[in-house]
Amino acid sequence: MRIKTLLASAAALAVVPMLSACTENASSGGGDAKADARALTVGSSADACELSATEAPAGTLSFDVTNTGSDVTEFYLLGSDGLRIVGEVENIGPNLTKKLTVNAPEGDYFTACKPGMVGEGIRAAFKVTHSEDEQAVSASDQELIDQAQTNYRAYVQDQSAQLLVKTKEFVQLYEGGKDDEARALYPVAREHWERIETVAESFGDLDPLTDAREADVDFAAGEKWTGWHRIEKDLWPQDAKGYTALTSAERTTYGDDLLANVTELDGRIQATGSDALTYPIDAIANGSIGLLEEVANGKITGEEEAWSHTDLWDFQANVDGARVAYEGVQGLLEGKDPELAKELTAKFAALQSVLDQYRDGDGFVLYTDLTPADTKKMTDAVNALSEPLSKLTAAVTS
């Protein structure tokens, strides 16, 4: 839907220059602060990013990010190059607080607040120091972590490969003027994107070209609208007043562009060696949380598929991705917090049960067929899962 982050090699992310104006309070030190040195607070306003400390000991860190401004904001922990995204939390509304939990080894980092969720953000250096009391990982837990990382990498690569195959079929149908068949394939092809959306969105140069909604594009600044939703509007123009259909040549331009960007995405996801993506255990857990947030922020509101109204396909795919990520770390969680594991399993099932009520054949009813009572039922099920799911990262990295 828009630029978001999870896991990516440094080479895959757009270069972002350093900024100033990130103000920080006193550095963490000894005394009473030592016990909570890994629990930090962040205040994000229109022109400042105030952290409670400039450093923390290695291990599981938590950042309670409070939006003190008037625009929705985001918070990032970036690697030493300012490009690699270690963790992020997004869509923090005014006067709200959200928590980011990451497992950070010793090293140099940057923090960044992004008021308005646009631009380069307000940045400052952040240091993670050596810690003698850093928790050792048992051999059995390490085995579970290794297995989770291997399985999640395979899952993402498989979904990306299927996305490329379906996109080729879709573009061929669209450019060939087979609109009914293209419309039927559109939500099916996009499911593969939505299942790995937090990974796909981590490529900040490709995501806006591939998945931007019309409302996300700053036409006044000269930005061009391309990708899935540009073609969606051309295939479902019935709600677009005064819309002029694209010519055959324009269809070829937009179709080829979509396929080129999806091909580039798949190449990066399938990369090996130094360009290979990494999937730390905290990032897998944060990915599960992020995908459910995608449901809450775009799918349950019907904003994502403004022309086709196929939002429930995306909803299901986001839930699929969140569940797969959760199940990848479930074995580790059951050893650390069995009650949380039990609750998450039950609430994933409850959410799926609600969503299943809106199936129609191989797909779902359109968003425009839903009543306010229907969307409230879905929202309640999403919220019921979101609260315990927010504890997942801290639990598996404890």
Image: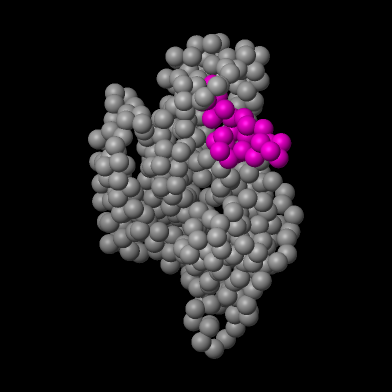
At a point 61% along the width and 57% down the height, the residue shown is 114
Q: Is residue 130 visible?
A: no
- Picture quadrant where residue 231 is located: top right
Left/right of residue 352 with respect to residue 175 in the rendered view: left
Q: Position of residue 51 (x, y in %)?
A: 59, 71
Residue 269 lies, with reference to residue 169, above or below; the image says below
> Residue lying furthest front in this view?
242
Residue 347 seen in the current view: yes
* Relative image position of residue 260 (x, y in whole percent): 64, 27
At horizontal 74% and vertical 59% (from top left) the residue drawn is: 18
Residue 167, position in %: x, y? 53, 24
Q: Residue at x 60, y 25 (%)?
A: 259
Residue at image x 54%, y 50%?
Answer: 6
Judge whether residue 29 is colored magenta.
no
As rendered, which of 242 and 346 lies closer to the eye? 242
Does 225 lie within the magenta span?
Answer: yes
Q: Say how the picture is coloured.
A: one colour
| Vertical side of 128 occupied by 157: above or below | above
Most extreme residue toward the bottom is 31
Range shown magenta: 207-234
Rendered position, 27 above or below 218: below
Q: Nearer the viewer, residue 240 or 127?
A: 240
Tell me which corner region of the image, top left, top right, bottom left or bottom right, holds residue 309. top left
